[in-house]
Image: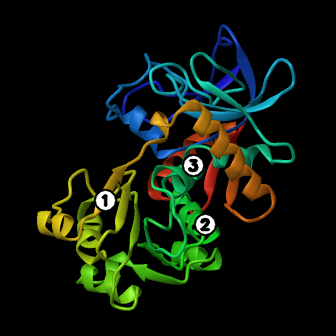
Amino acid sequence: MRAALVREVGSGPEVGDVTEPPGETIAVLAAPINPIDLAVSRGVLATGHPPLPYVPGCEAVGRTADGRVVWTFGGSLGRTSNGAMAERASVGDAHMIDVPDGADPALAAALGIAGLAGWLPLAWRAPLTGGENVLVLGATGSAGLVAVQTAKLLGAARVVAAGRSAAGLERAAQHGADATLRLDESDDLVAAFKAAFGGEGPSYVFDPLWGAPAAAAVEAAVPHATIVNLGQSAGPTSELSSAAVRFKCLSIFGHTNFLVPPDELAEHYRRLVGHAITGEIRLEVERVPLDSVADAWRRQGEGPGAKLVVVP
């Protein structure tokens, strides 16, 4: 069968022929390219990488032998064993969650890792109760764009989208953000974050960035605010002020999709895809033929405007 193949650590994939995987498999309908896939290929993920050469891809939507359409994710898939960017993928120890009827496979796949990263912090990890002033950092990426829409859907009073891409922030505004903020155009992020909420600062921060933006958000946040971190795009460390955390009684949560209990993962995945079917959550998807995976992989590293999904 044909598959994307990473032959060397630090290099992108190329298309090649491999033997069909053993055991239970799915016929892959759509396999997104995610930042975690690039991290695995570079050898920087804590779990390492599969034996070379390997098939990348930590998730896919595919069809089972009995005709079910499922989202497959987790376990060793694409992290320490062959992944899903191929005509067929082994299920192995990954989760298989039924995709709701009527969902486009490429969109259902795009709403997996990236979509749930935007949904779960606000809906499950530290759930919104309504009326919060939400600052969405990294709002120009797929997860951030879903977070903007999720916050509005779950009753946030005001949602401010922050990022570095002007085009991405324009998309965030089109998808419901009440205001946008360019992170690279402010010399004082603390003041900018406060001003975006009428001088008071956010009461909830969605943070896939860490680094300096997270530190500024902690300083700007109001007392009893919640911060949920799910990434480190702006840096692996952040100099948080102990005084700001202590005296404002802030709550700081960490989140990763990989540690969500299976029943919660299934429930929230189906909820999210259901909102997409009804048009309440939107995400731009670009379908990429398997033959074009090398170019799409390069574009993923540069920050594409749409979610890139390989369609074998």
Image disc number at residue 144: none
Mark found first going from the N terminus, 3 or 1: 3
User: Which residue is labeled 3 in the image?
Assistant: 116
Q: Residue flagged by tag 2: what amino acid is it?
A: Leu
- Which residue does the image show at 68% across and 13% down from the upper left? 20
- The answer for how far apart the CA atoms under marks 3 and 1 are is 21 Å
**Residue 18: percent from left, percent from top:** 63, 15
User: Which residue is labeled 1 in the image?
Assistant: 251
Helix, strand or loop under label 3 = helix
Q: Residue flagged by tag 1: what amino acid is it?
A: Ser
- Which residue does the image show at 87% across and 47% down from the upper left? 102
Specify the quadrant of the image occupied by residue 62. Answer: top right
**Residue 309: percent from left, percent from top:** 66, 46
Q: Residue flagged by tag 3: what amino acid is it?
A: Leu
- Which residue does the image show at 38% across and 57% down from the upper left? 228
- The answer for how far apart the CA atoms under marks 2 and 1 are is 19 Å
Helix, strand or loop under label 2 = loop
Q: Nearer the viewer, mark 3 or mark 2?
A: 2
User: Which residue is labeled 2 in the image?
Assistant: 154
| Disc 3 and disc 1 in contact, CB within 8 angstroms | no
**Residue 146: percent from left, percent from top:** 59, 61
